[in-house]
Amino acid sequence: MFDTILDEHVTALRAAGRSPRTIEAREQVIRQLGRTAGDPCRLTTRDLQVWLATPGWSAWTLATYQMHVRGFYGWLAAAGHRADDPTAALLRTRTPQDTPKPVTDAELAHALAVGREPWLTAVLLAAYAGLRCGDIAALTRADVTERTITIRRGKGGKDAVLPCHPKIWEAVAERGPGPLVPVGRRYLSNRAAAYFTSIGLPGVHMHRFRHYYATALLRRGVNIRVVQRLMRHSSLATTAKYLAVDDAEAFAAVNEL
């Protein structure tokens, strides 16, 4: 019964044009809910509160899980599979507002100097094109020319054409057809910390190279609207967070006088 309903929900998400990554994440979260809390179709508000109060989850994890749970139960009620929406009484989780933490110039140089594949290419794509792990895993040689990088169904299912940095072109120009980084998004996300620690960069993860891209552009005086487009941020407020990085460094520099 539950598997049939979840399959129906997945079909509804596809029909609504949700991205494959969103659909995959929704299915994973709801199946995890079912394994640990019981049949999701029968859970109460209290059951969901207990599950969402699981110790050890980060603020981002909690916000993500609640978003998927709300989406599932809202559809469940609208589709007539239950009379109520048990998430209606849940207090909304505050979405954490993290300050970006780009790698330093020295950290990037070290990652490129001692890096090995598939990480070396992944770092180049994140640091010099602002690509996310999902973008990197999906990118093929055919998507890259000397001038452009074509992103197909990136975050939110959106396509994009971005400038290709000379360093990226130099690294991939002679490669054959197929994926430039032949591993999946989860591999890049889940194994990054261990890899970077192994090469002397503890605390570094892939998204910090994307942070570097945005911060480096702003430091060079690129208009924030242009940076917003290059980073593919839907909101200018998200891009503006990267200005705060330089503000913090400016105050720190004055304090050193």
Image (cartoon, rainbow, N blue to C red):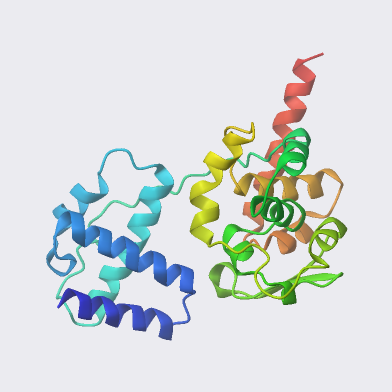
- In the image, is residue 99 above or below residue 78? above
Q: On the image, which quarter does residue 106 sit in?
A: top right
**Split into 4 quadrants, where in the image is the N terminus?**
bottom left
**Residue 234 seen in render:** no
The x, y position of residue 77, in whole percent, is 22, 76
Residue at the far top in the pictured view: 257
The answer to whether residue 58 is left or right of residue 72 is right
Q: Write the residue at 75% across / 58% down.
A: 129
Determine the residue positioned at 71% across, 75% down: 177
Q: Is residue 189 above or below residue 176?
A: above
Picture quarter containing residue 255? Answer: top right
Q: How many marks?
A: 0
Q: Is residue 60 left or right of residue 10?
A: right
Where residue 130 sits in the image (x, y, percent)? 70, 56
Residue depicted at 63% across the width and 33% down the height: 201
Determine if residue 177 is in view.
yes
Residue projecting furthest to the bottom: 15
Q: Quadrant of the C terminus?
A: top right
Q: Residue at x 25, y 43 (%)?
A: 54
- Would you identify the image quadrant in which residue 161 lies? bottom right
Residue 145 drawn at (x, y percent): 82, 72
What percent of the width, then of the height, locates residue 22?
44, 68
User: As rendered, which of 40 and 242 lies closer to the eye?
Assistant: 40
